Image: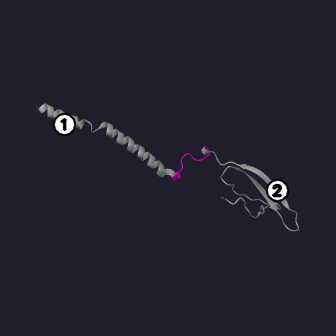
Amino acid sequence: MLDPHIRTALPPVPGTPGAYSLTFRAPDRHGVFKFVLDYKRKGWSFLRSAITVPVVPPRHDGYPRFLSAAWPYYAGAISTSAGFILFTALWLGGGGGGAEKKSLKGKKAE
């Protein structure tokens, strides 16, 4: 499991005095997360802020249609399907008439 706490320093925003900002990624899972800022310094006032945010990962149709890492699997499925169709065509289309022709030739000779 992931550590539920992200402890980091608040870096100041360049060009804006007194403003601090931090960007991070939330876990890729469903849930309701509470983001808490608890900033305490001796001799200064304390900052305490909490916000509850629902996090919903992308839906199943939010991802790309075909994954580039899955091309070996796609090629395997396509080649297996093509092989099955070729085998079926050869099985149904040929090989059955040879035994009948031999038996007919033998009857004509008698």
Along the line of sight, the residue nearer the viewer: 17 or 90: 90
Callout 2, which amino acid?
Answer: Ser
Residue located beneath label 2 in the image: 49
- Magenta span: 61-69
Q: Is residue 105 above or below residue 27?
A: above
Q: Quick check: 7 left or right of 57?
A: right
**Measured Cα–Cα span from mark 2 to mark 1:** 93 Å
Q: Position of residue 29 (x, y in %)?
A: 66, 51
Q: In terms of image quadrants, where is residue 61?
A: top right
Q: Position of residue 31 (x, y in %)?
A: 70, 50
Q: Secondary structure at mark 2?
A: strand
Lower sequence index among marks 2 and 1: 2
Q: Is residue 70 above or below residue 20?
A: above
Q: Position of residue 46 (x, y in %)?
A: 86, 62
Given the current orientation, which residue lies at the most extreme bottom position?
42
Front position among marks 2 and 1: 1
Q: Quick check: 24 left or right of 68?
A: right
Residue located beneath label 1 in the image: 102
| Residue plotted at (25% across, 35% down) | 97
Q: How many numbered markers are drawn?
A: 2
The reply to whether dot 2 and dot 1 touch (C-beta < 8 Å) is: no
Tell me if I can see residue 16 in this picture: no
